[in-house]
């Protein structure tokens, strides 16, 4: 429809303008020709005294010639409004009382009128004295413009035929080009339907316009992202099942071992029960971390935002974690460069920062250190957690925020890690519209940089 409208409507509009312009130009030229003939007749009529005698074969012949050329009627009137000459020989000797003639005799100059309905031109031309410029009479010319209208009609017929042919071509081109344009989009729709049916392994390759190819690339990127998310979901479910099943399996093995032995010493009972208690604690920690993730996955509408003194919040977290650090002989260093008040969810931010500091303690070296610093500018506040620990391999740094991902699974099990801490931390920070980055070198320690807006952005 757009191609048809843009093709035919302007064509019709410009055709109408072209025909009207031709007609106006032709009428204007006809008027100019008649004025020239009137000027010539005016000079001849005055010089030969025709307005007085009304007889001069040469003048009559010239008047008749002009009348025949333009297929019209010429009436010559003196200043008494008496008709001296009428090429139709109908009104000679009578008086012509006309507004145009009277105004012409009064010095108004040439008067003209074009009647578009009946297709004729009426021109009233003054006959003036050469010296005094006094109007001595008037020449009234009535000529048909049907020849101009006939040419216009002929042109209009040809233009209409041209428009019909061009219109058919435009419609045909429109349907063809629309088909070419929408074919790639149809492929996209079919691919979407294919994915809706559950087939996510197939991408699409569309050749054509740059914009269409960009759609194809974006669509394939979306498919790749969806496959990654699906794989992550399946891996997450598998990891959750495995992590929840492992402590239960250990508890069952320990319990079965006790049941299979007769007269088991109380010390062995105590040892096995302590192991069972540890496994139960581990199961409980996994469940609590999963619940925390579920809560963080909810919308930001669940955020309890309030102005919080970040300095005091960090001091409370450090006070709670210092005993853990002392057990491993880890030195805790806290630096605050300025007071910071920010709009945050205290519980979620505490959970995120606690996980970072606790990991820095757990994955540190003996007699190591953990340095926490707080700073701010006019828009954000910044928390940096650095340690002298074992570091993170470069190839693992892109994956550490994934759920259940562990760099060293054996060490994580020893320290009681679930592989969910950094995932919880990242979610909590992102819910504050913040960002977290990691810088680490294996064997030299790790630094986490956190940036969060001072004012919560809804």
Image (cartoon, grey):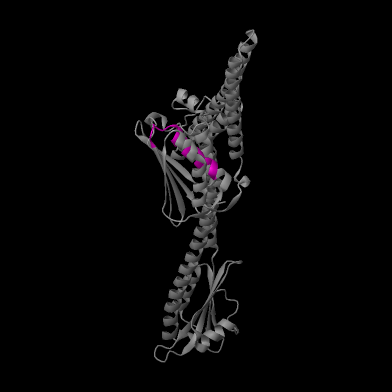
Residue 256: image location, x then y, percent: 63, 12
Which of 308/175 is in front? Answer: 308
Image quadrant in which you'd find residue 365? top left
Residue 150 visible somewhere in the drawing: yes
Q: Is residue 144 above or below residue 187?
A: below
Decide whether the magenta segment is chiefly helix, strand or loop.
Answer: helix
Which of 411/10 is in front? Answer: 411
> Residue 378 magenta-drawn?
no
> Residue 366 magenta-drawn?
yes
Residue drawn at x 48%, y 67% is: 69
Residue 48: image location, x then y, percent: 42, 84
Q: Is residue 204 left or right of residue 245?
A: left
The magenta span reads 349-368
Which of 177/287 is in front? Answer: 287
Residue 35: image location, x then y, percent: 45, 75
Which of 421/330 is in front? Answer: 330
Residue 162 visible somewhere in the drawing: no
């Amino acid at each position: 429809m757009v191609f048809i409208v843009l093709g035919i409507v302007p064509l019709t509009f410009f055709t109408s303008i072209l025909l009207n312009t031709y007609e106006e130009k032709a009428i204007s030229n006809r008027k100019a020709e008649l004025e020239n003939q009137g000027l010539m007749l005016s000079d001849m009529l005055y010089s030969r005294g025709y307005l007085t005698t009304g007889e001069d074969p040469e003048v009559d012949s010239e008047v008749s010639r002009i009348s025949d050329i333009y297929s019209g009627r010429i009436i010559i009137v003196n200043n008494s409004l008496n008709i001296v000459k009428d090429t139709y020989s109908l009104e000679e000797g009578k008086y012509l009382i006309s507004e145009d003639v009277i105004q012409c005799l009064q010095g108004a100059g040439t008067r003209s009128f074009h009647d578009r309905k009946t297709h004729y031109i009426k021109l009233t031309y003054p006959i003036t004295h050469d010296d005094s410029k006094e109007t001595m009479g008037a020449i009234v010319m009535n000529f048909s413009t049907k020849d101009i209208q006939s040419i216009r009609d002929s042109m209009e017929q040809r233009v209409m035929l041209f428009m019909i042919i061009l219109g058919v071509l435009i419609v045909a081109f429109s349907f063809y080009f629309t088909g070419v344009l929408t074919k790639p989009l149809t492929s996209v729709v079919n691919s979407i339907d294919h994915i809706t049916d559950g087939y996510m392994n197939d991408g699409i390759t569309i050749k054509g316009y740059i914009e269409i190819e960009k759609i194809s690339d974006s669509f394939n990127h979306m498919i790749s992202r969806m496959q990654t998310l699906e794989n992550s979901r399946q891996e997450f479910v598998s990891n959750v099942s495995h992590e929840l099943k492992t402590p239960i399996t250990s508890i069952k093995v320990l319990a079965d071992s006790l049941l299979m032995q007769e007269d088991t010493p109380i010390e062995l009972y105590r040892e096995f029960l302590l192991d069972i208690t540890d496994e139960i604690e581990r199961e409980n920690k996994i469940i609590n971390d999963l619940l925390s993730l579920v809560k963080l996955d909810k919308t930001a509408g669940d955020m309890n935002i309030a102005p919080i003194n970040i300095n005091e919040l960090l001091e409370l977290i450090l006070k709670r974690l210092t005993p853990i650090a002392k057990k491993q002989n880890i030195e805790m260093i806290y630096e605050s460069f300025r007071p910071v008040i920010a709009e945050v969810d205290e519980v979620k931010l505490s959970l995120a920062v606690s996980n970072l500091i606790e990991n820095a303690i757990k994955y540190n070296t003996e007699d190591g250190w953990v340095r926490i610093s707080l700073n701010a500018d006019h828009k954000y506040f910044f928390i940096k957690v650095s340690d002298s620990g074992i570091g993170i391999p470069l190839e693992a740094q892109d994956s550490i925020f994934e759920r259940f991902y562990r760099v060293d699974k054996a060490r994580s099990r020893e320290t009681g890690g679930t592989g969910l801490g950094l995932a919880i931390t990242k979610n909590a920070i992102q819910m504050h519209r913040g960002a977290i980055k990691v810088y680490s070198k294996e064997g030299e320690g790790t630094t986490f940089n956190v940036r969060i807006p001072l004012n919560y952005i809804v």
